[in-house]
Image (cartoon, rainbow, N blue to C red):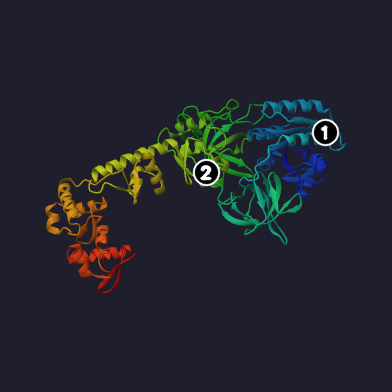
Amino acid sequence: MSTMTVIATAGHVDHGKSTLVRALTGIEPDRWEEERRRALTIDLGYAWTTLDSGQTVAFVDVPGHRRFIGNMLAGLGPVPAVMFVVAADESWMPQSAEHLAAAAALGVEHVLLVVTRADLADPAPALERATAELAAAGLTPRGAVAVSARTGAGMDELRAALAALVETMPVPDPEARVRLWVDRAFTITGAGTVVTGTLGGGRIRVGDSLDLAGSSGEHRSARVTVRGLHSLEQSRETVEAPARVAVNLRGVSADEIHRGDALLTPGAWPSTRVVDARLVTPPRAATGTPYGFETDLPEHLMLHLGTTAREVRVRPLGSGTTSEPRRDGHVTSGREGVRASADDHSPSAASAVRLTLAEPLPLAAGDRAILRDPGTGRVVGIDILDVDPPELRRRGAGARRAEALAGRASGIDLQTEVAARGFLTVDDARRLGVTDDVLADPPPEITRHGDLLVDHEVWLGWVETLRVVTGEYARTHPLEPWMPAEAARTAARIPRLDLIAPLAEAAGLTHARGRVHEPGLRASLGAAEAGLAAIEARLAGSPFAAPERPELDAAGLGPRQIAAAIEAGRLIRLDDDVLLQPIAPAKAMRVLTGLPQPFTTSQARQALDTTRRVAIPLLEHLDAKGWTRRIDAGHREIVR
């Protein structure tokens, strides 16, 4: 299949958009009988053609009438390029301004201006006016052509201009995660449920499992399977972006899917109800162009993104934000509020807003969308900056958040996302939109451990805190100064136990046997230290003469002191009341090796010069280590 580019039409009602698409493609874009009867595009239409260069161009033909502005925005939203149509005999009209406002608010960069009906009037005045309007709105056309679809005049030039426009279009990443905004859902006999949409990134294959995220009414989500694919009325095994595509789905009925739902790569998109965004208003064009809001933002507006339209609550975050609704239904930010006027197109704290949706949507930082007031038709563009923003609980938090957002660049930035949270898992970073090439080589400000990405300053803070809490633990637990790793994790507020080992290494600490401590740290027995040293000295000369309770009591060695000595590796316990030095088993083996094999328990006891109280547990200890083997009830032998 040749490379496809998807272009939306835009322009005033009855300026010849559908006629132009029909002349270019030979396909009737108006799908409904009512549309053809009234010669009026009501819903979205689709058609395509292959240019002489071999490039395929698919058109999304949008309605021009103001009554169907929601359908127009659904067609324009997912598409990266616009063919803006103005009729020579009528020139610039009200819906021309509305469509231009929407395209400018969405930040569409690839625009082709076409003046139609050049056979009915001199196209030069309309071409001059429309060029000025687009340029004033920040949308300098990549080309401008005057045509007559009826006579065919200028159509060759239009096809050449389309080919030149296509050459400027960026190529989407075929490995990107899929988010296909649904614009139609219907049933085909023998096939079942089919949805259509514009694939802007990634690829879809027959057999793929996708998440269906609902956006209409009560929030829904389901796992569906791709049963078949069609693009340009041809069956496909794989479709790569950019493309118009029809997806035959298994696992859902057509009446369960609505325009504005989305097919998603499973687990790859965050589903969010709260986002932080920046108002982005283009420069003002002519008088009457409905950009921005001359008063404070209404508290409730419609969010248009992709093919979805959702009501959102708007909270300005500028200095002094109180977010309290006024009696007229607007919200204010301090004394002056937040306005999206023609002069507010540069990033600033005053342009930051928080949007709250009634149901979650699959959104990403870098998404460009429109806020629209259905009553006035006013629109303002927004650049979504954060789809997982922090809660704002304290007084002044909104203003501080606005200042932080003022310097944030558009799109996803791994360092920014990690710094905002302190740490982030790789999977969560992917869901936010971070690509694998960035994750494979994170910036130096990020420390990566396994699947966790940690802000470097946070990592250094954990290192220092771990050093402090282990030192404090040793001071307050002199008999057992080796801090359990889980206790250290909790005290240092480290999120995962597997981080203790690398953090301990970075802090110069020892991490062994599930404990963290200073290297070479020994238990401090206090007053009992001298008594233990005396017992150690006696055992050095008589290694199998285990101390009995009176001797231990006299030395000041109670249960806690004995446990500390064992933990420190100064004593071993063979059973409840037999304590020896850790070297004793090895010394016993040197003695037992000299006995005739096999040997009896009595022979072993006499050779070791000890009592039966010590000999029995000592021999059982050697059996357990595999150094000796019990032959029968009375005999053992050395294992060689």
| Residue 589 in view (yes/no) | yes
Looking at the picture, does residue 111 appear above or below residue 35? Answer: above
x and y percentages locating residue 228 in the rendered image: 70, 56
Q: Please tell me how crowded label 1 is: few (under 14), some (14-19), or many (20+) other residues with Cα within 10 Å.
A: some
Of the two numbered discs 1 and 2 on the same chain, state the one appearing first in sequence: 1
Residue 11 shows up from this direction:
no
Which residue is more in the foreground, 393 or 494? Answer: 494
Secondary structure beneath dot 1 equals: helix
* C-alpha span from label 1 to label 2: 46 Å
Q: Which residue is mark 1?
A: 157
Residue at the image position 41 percent from the left and 39 percent from the top = 459
The residue under label 2 is: 429
Q: Between tags 1 and 2, which lies in front?
A: 2
In this rendering, position of residue 478 left or right of residue 500: left
Q: Which quarter shows the C terminus?
A: bottom left
Q: Left or right? Give the position of 234 relative to 216.
A: right
**Residue at position x 17%, y 57% from top?**
542
Position above or below: 285 against 61: above
| Viewer-side residue, 6 vs 492 | 492
Residue 626: x and y in percent read: 33, 64
- Which residue is at 22% across, 48% downward? 479
Q: Which residue is at the front of the view, 329 or 168?
A: 168
The answer to which image quadrant residue 166 occupies is top right
- Amino acid type, label 1: Glu
